[in-house]
Image (tube, rainbow, N blue to C red):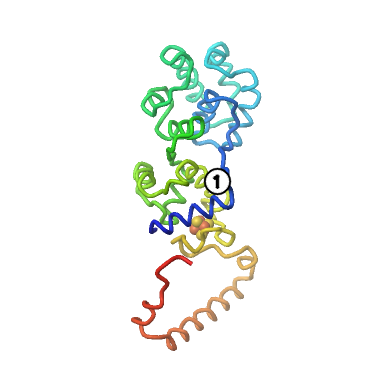
Amino acid sequence: MTRDQVFEFFRRLADANPAPETELEYSNPYQLLVAVVLSAQATDASVNIACRPLFERITTPQHMMELGEDSLRDAIKTIGLFNTKAKNVIALSEALIERFGSEIPRTREELQSLPGVGRKTANVVLNTAFGEETFAVDTHVFRVCNRTGLTPGQDVDQVEAKHEKIVPQPFRRDAHHWLILHGRYTCKARLPECWRCPVIDLCRYNPKTPPPEERAKPSAARSANRASSKARTAKGRTASKPKANRSRSRPSRLP
Ligand code: SF4
């Protein structure tokens, strides 16, 4: 995408949701850190269900150490990979007490030095708890960036690096949330809901998903529609202007 198109892409997402927020429930940076660690390969909804009763009692690393690994494992057993996650949460709580005076560190390097905390988790905490302009690339963000052509990349590091370069200032703080929410609720993995997408004309993904009523038509009717559409296209081609004229007629700016 061009810089103008990137600006327009985020302007529309911002119009639709001016103040996007994480869907994880938390009341302080420590709880946010724990929730993000628990959310790896799990849904935010499943983490919230497990953490709601837990976070009523546990608000600090000390509380978590007093709870202990066995009780924590039991409290989060509905979340995938709960054994490893319980170990990591206890270990990171211990590290926070010993090395950071029970405070959540504010640099990526320090955060990543904690057990179970990778770059993505550190970026989410820096952005959501401390307002830093960091871009956490999760599965939704990675998919949306590649599908749309916004910031395509072969791995999450490439996508994050392109974001750093191309996302314009008014949108840098919230870009991560807009893309996650767009991927979670509109540009879904199995079937992107293109027919109701606010950035459909900016997105390079093809073919776009038609609306449900169109997809519900019997296949014979769909084939007939496709045939008639092809015929119209072929007729249009015969009657259209020469190539040189067509390329001149393309708009050079966004509508
Ligand atoms: S048009 Fe479709 S593929 Fe493109 S961003 Fe929207 S929902 Fe995703």
Question: Quick one: quadrant of the N terminus?
Answer: bottom left
Please report the residue visible at 52 percent of the width from the left and 42 percent of the height from the top: 177
Q: Residues within 10 Å of mark 1 (few under 14, many from 20)?
A: many
Q: Residue furthest front?
A: 170
**Taking 188 as reference, is 122 left or right?**
left
Provide residue 89's location: percent of width, then percent of height.
49, 21
Instruction: Give the residue at mark 1.
Output: 181
Report the amino acid beneath label 1.
Leu
Residue at (47% x, 24% y) in the render:
84
Q: Secondary structure at mark 1?
A: helix
Give coordinates of residue 141: x percent, y percent: 46, 46
Q: Position of residue 182 (x, y in %)?
A: 54, 49
Q: Is 203 positioned to the left or the right of 160 in the image? A: right
Q: From the viewer's side, name the closer residue of 159 and 27.
A: 27
Left or right position of 230 against 58: left
Q: Nearer the viewer, residue 56 or 251?
A: 251
Q: Is residue 135 above or below residue 89?
A: below
Residue 5: x and y, percent? 43, 59
Residue under the image location 43 percent in, 84 percent down: 237
Front residue of 72 and 34:
34
Asked which quadrant contains residue 59, the reply is top right
* Direction from residue 73 to residue 206 in the image, left or right: left
Q: Residue at point 39% right, 46% down?
A: 163
Of 39 and 5, which appears nearest the observer?
5
The answer to whether the beta carbon of the residue marked 1 is less than 8 Å from any atom of ligand 1 is no
Compared to residue 141, the image places residue 29 above or below, namely above
